[in-house]
Image (tube, grey):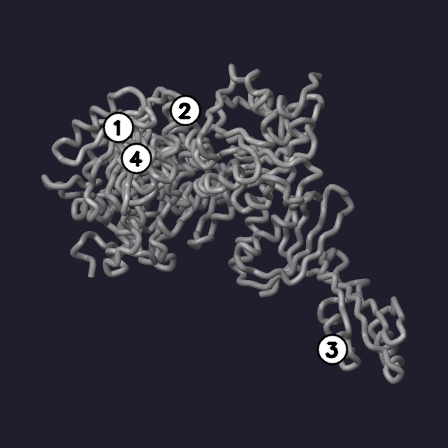
Amino acid sequence: MARMIGAEMFFETLIDEGIDVIFGIPGGYVLKVYDVMPKFTDRIKHVLTRHEQGATHMADGYARASGKPGVVLCTSGPAATNTVTGIATAQMDSSPIVVFTGQVPLPYLGSDAFQEADHIGITRPCTKHNYLVRKAIDLPKTMKEAFYIASSGRPSPVLVDMPKDVILGEDELIIPDEISLRGYNPPTKGDPKQIKKAVDMILKSKRPIIFGGGGIIHANATAELIEFAHRLEIPVTSTLMGLGAYPQDDPLYVHMLGMHGSYAANMAVHSSDLVISIGARFDDRATGGNFEEFSPNAEIIHIDIDPSTIDKNIVVHCPIIGHAKEVLKQLLEALPSKIDFDRSKWRRQINEWDKKHPMSYNQTEDKILTSFAIDTLSKITDDDAIIVSDVGQHQMWVAQFYKFNYPRTHITSGGLGTMGFGFPAGMGAKFACPDKQVVCVCGDGSFQMNMQELATAVEHKMDLKIMLLNNGHHGMVRQWQTMFFEGNYSASRFGVLPDFVMLAQSFGATGLRVDRPDQLEATLKEGLSTEGVVLMEIMVDCEELVYPMIAPGGAMSDMILGVSDVA
Amino acid sequence: MRHTISLFVDNESGVLSRVAGLFSARGFNIESLNVAETLDPDTSRITLVTTGDDFIIEQVIKRFNNMVNVIWVDDLTEETRVEREMILLRVEAKEKTRAEILRMADIFRAKVVDVGLETYTLELTGDKEKVNAFMELLEPMGIKEIARTGTVAMKRDTKNSNTGDSQ
């Protein structure tokens, strides 16, 4: 057995786990880890970020684009607390990241030593599990457990705290082949009795709809979902997190549901007699938040890997605990060979809703509308481009107007709604998929929250495009102030903004700007075809509002469809 | 509704905070909590009593099941179970009341574990009702201090239900 110190075990275990890139910043208690790192950089790339929050979002973006866990390495105290927003973001959207933090030596724990913070205590509520390692010999086993927990079951973040004496401690390297934890057995197959019950419900339904969520993407269950939907001719709608899980070009697709979802999708869910939810959790932004009036005439089948999501917001008639891919396979197997159904009336109804109030905008010659800009982007990017959005109005327009046909091509902070996520997460996605076109779509507000990572992107000569939609405001805040606060625009306008083009140039990136609708497409094409990091600043109308909208706490059938609906 | 929840957990640092954290995150109070090693030294048993909305308690129990350190969890509320609590109680024992206190201790099968010049310290085991009744009766004498263990509970062995367990 090879003897080595904890710092070397750290890299040996990462390599054993198949990790090829880590995101981090050196500092006090992890300096020894960084000291041994050059021996391993032929097998593991280290990305020196400019802020630990950036590192965490990069790891998250990497995980969402690749399905493999993203890894963060940083020191203790402020570095560890800087990762908390990124960890909570990953947890809310079920993204597998593993964060390694340095820590004061064990004897100093709890003594208010320099750069000491209680990482375990601080991250307990926002991780699936976390570890304080006490001996170097335990480090490889703990790391393997961390990766197993993060990436199995419902994917989630895990934090491993490494005191300095563990990093320096010398012992034998023992990497276990298999991990078994007596308190952790993630579900796989659904209960056959529930499968049978679900099939009976499906066969008797006249107006079924599939309510698809991010769980389909995590489970890589797109192929099974397509087969299931086609076999039974069931329309498929999607939550924000589920975009891309089902091809939007497919005739059975009904565009996104929820607070800013389509009229057709919300009406279809509201009028359905059977909602089949797969990998979704009925959160308030997907259902409008009026849980009592959710789909009043429907029975509900809820397929989820996490038992704690069952009956949390909506009481369901047939829960199936299991992995979406496995459960869909079981359902397909349990279907009779010949099924009689006639969906023509139901599908015609949905099409009529769609025709009545399609997603639309009215671009004039004057100011660029963000909806138009996103629609244009959708038309000129690669079919399988990865679009990473930030948080706010532009995020909703990306969801409404960008056509996603493949899983893992739409990445956004849906659950926590973390502004500043988009740009670093887009970098992470590009590290995961270097051969794909990656575009970060950001607002001026959200880009400013992590723009320091421009340096990291340029340093790594990334071929990454940033579409920055500048409306001079916190756009979604402004929208709510318009709609619900009598136009009292308190603190939503930026008094000063940087010159984003010059800002990009100062980092060594390319900057472009456009403010005329007729020049938008040409500018975007120029930006997308320019090598390297390119920031395209699009000056947009700050008065455009995202519609339709279910007012918070409203029912899905109760949508505000446009300006004329606002009292 | 009042719930008695039994958890088997890994016997290691931090597990109790994880369990308690699920309650504090929802603004719930834990009425009593007891933790000790089981026959297996790697495992601890937690008995937790809380009052709250049944729906939310059910969610909390599902979350317990998700925890890596929780091996097994059971809501004993609807089960036939044995529940006990121990109390140490220091009561003023003046000339006039000393005999009365001892008589009461005898009726409740409490033990005198410490005798001071003007106090008795009593030890009593029983279910919550018995402990409360004992305290009520001693109240007029002047209870100076108490320490309660909180409830510990076990499902009854259904084959021998209600035998050999009279108070």
- Name above or below for residue B31 compared with residue B61: below
Q: Which mark is in front, 4 or 1? A: 1
> What residue is at 22 percent from the left and 35 percent from the top?
A538
The kind of residue tagged 2 is Phe
Mark 2 and mark 4 lie on one chain; the one further toward the N terminus is 2
Query: Which residue is denoted by mark 2 in the rendering?
Result: A431
Which chain is mark 2 on? A
Q: Which mark is in front, 1 or 2? A: 1
What is the CA distance from the residue labelled 3 to the residue labelled 1? 79 Å
Q: Residue A291: x, y in percent?
A: 38, 57
Q: Which mark is residue B136?
A: 3
Q: Position of A134 compared to A20: left or right?
A: right
> What residue is at 19 percent from the left and 57 percent from the top?
A565
Q: Is there any visible trace of residue B80 in the rendered image? A: yes
Query: Which residue is denoted by mark 4 in the rendering?
Result: A441
What is the CA distance from the residue labelled 4 to the residue labelled 1? 15 Å
SS at circle 4: strand
Q: Position of A228 compared to A185: left or right?
A: left
Query: Which residue is denoted by mark 1 in the rendering?
Result: A511
Give neighbour class at mark 2: few <14, some 14-19, many 20+ (Cα, 10 Å). Answer: many
The kind of residue tagged 4 is Val
